[in-house]
Image: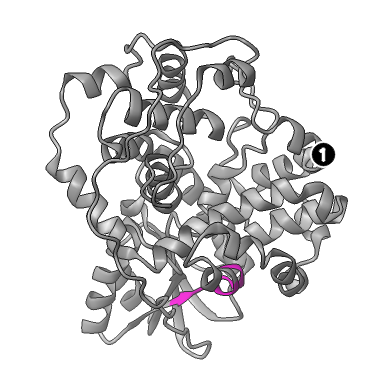
Amino acid sequence: MDRFPLTRAAALERLERFVPRAGSAYAARRNLVDPQGNHANVSRLSAALRRRLIGEDEVVQSVLAAHRLDKCEKFIAEVFWRTYWKGWLEQRPGVWSAYLADVSAFHPGTMIAEAMAGRTGIDAFDHWARELAATGYLHNWARMQVASIWIFTLGLPWQLGAQWFLEKLVDADPASNTLSWRWVAGLHTPGKTYLADADRIAAMTGGRFRPDGLARVARTPEAASPLPRTPLRTAIALDPALPTLVLLTPEDCSLETVLPDLDVRAVVVADDLAANEWDRMALDDAALRAAAHWQCPVGVANPVAFAELHGCRQVVTGFAPVGPVAAALDALRSRLAANGMVLAEHQRTWDRLCWPHCGKGFFNLKSEIPRLLDQLRPMRSPLSVCLP
């Protein structure tokens, strides 16, 4: 819990402790990778942000309350990178579908298993593969090296590497994980690959690793023609007058902090949508807070039956971006409709304002950051996020 907070209280405490280091110290040391796994140079809030135990707006506003933007812009940009990946995939959901199809079509062999077990003979890669297995985490810069070596040195399919990370990372996110692997491979920005370099790895690990035999040429994998950009999906509006069941999923575990006033009669925890023990920890914490906030029955149950039991006419959940949870909610929407109920979604203001700028390269979003921060600043008081 201390390494990767998975309750809202722990995440807020971690944020408060990290804020003093989010300025020039972060900019100077963020890419240094401690071989012993002491990743104190980065916030380690990604697992909490992934599940929205805390919001990006809370993190950014707390940092800006302590630092001028020009002093903390590196950290702020990293928060927006997470948003960029999600917004980009929302406008090209076919990329996710194609990735899933590719993973299903591949048949992993012995070389894949050896790489995942950290038995390639490439010192840095093997160390990080074992760290991932032991902790569920890798420093972001290390992830880039692992992905590059997997693709260009080992010659393995990027899709299976992405699936490995998706299954093992405590902060695994369909958008940032899939698209980051595509970016390393040279598929996100055509012709722009990321090639791991032994000297650079030595510099970033304090000389602990300097792998031999790394690829010197990055050959972009073959790919299908680029998929067209599609309009952003519109959230299905909720009706404050209807008796409501709140559905908690791993995509948003702090709905009580953002939903408007509703006639909430019950809360259901979507435990079946938890991909791992980390999701369940976050959902357990969300359930406790939801019960205290709405003072209503909370259960792990069939949402349709639970809604009917408590006289609910609508189910409200957080907007689920492209990924497994969104697919499961599509199926639930049909079941609810057959029983005369609607599945409504709350889309956070952060996503609604940022995603329209994520359809092209990151620079398009980055150039909008000052204006977006002005729009987002009134959302919450920074003082409210300093309390566990």
Residue 302 at least partly seen: no
Total numbered labels placed on residues in the image = 1
Q: 385 and 97: which one is in front?
A: 97
Q: Label 1: how many residues lie within 10 Å, few (<14), some (14-19) or many (20+)?
A: some
- At x 24%, y 50%, the residue is 223
Residue found at the very far bottom of the displayed protein:
241
Quarter of the rendering containing residue 150 = top left
Q: Secondary structure at mark 1?
A: helix
- Could you say where residue 214 lies in the image, as x and y percent from the top left? 40, 18
Quarter of the rendering containing residue 92 = bottom left
Q: In the picture provided, is 184 more to the left or to the right than 21?
A: left
The chosen color scheme is one colour
Quarter of the rendering containing residue 280 = top left
Q: In the picture provided, is 14 more to the left or to the right than 321?
A: right
Residue 263 is one of the magenta-drawn residues: no
- Could you say where residue 25 lies in the image, as x and y percent from the top left? 80, 34
Residue 175 at least partly seen: yes
Residue 351 is one of the magenta-drawn residues: yes
Q: In the rendered view, would you say 219 is above or below 256?
A: above
Q: 323 and 307: which one is in front?
A: 323
Residue at mark 1: 24
Q: In the rendered view, would you say 225 is above or below 63?
A: below
- Could you say where residue 45 lies in the image, as x and y percent from the top left? 62, 42
- Could you say where residue 72 lies in the image, as x and y percent from the top left? 78, 48
Q: In the picture provided, is 102 more to the left or to the right than 59?
A: left
- At x 72%, y 30%, the residue is 29
**What's under tag 1, amino acid-wise?**
Ser
- At x 24%, y 24%, the residue is 112
Q: Which residues are magenta?
A: 345-353
- Quarter placement of the N terminus: top right
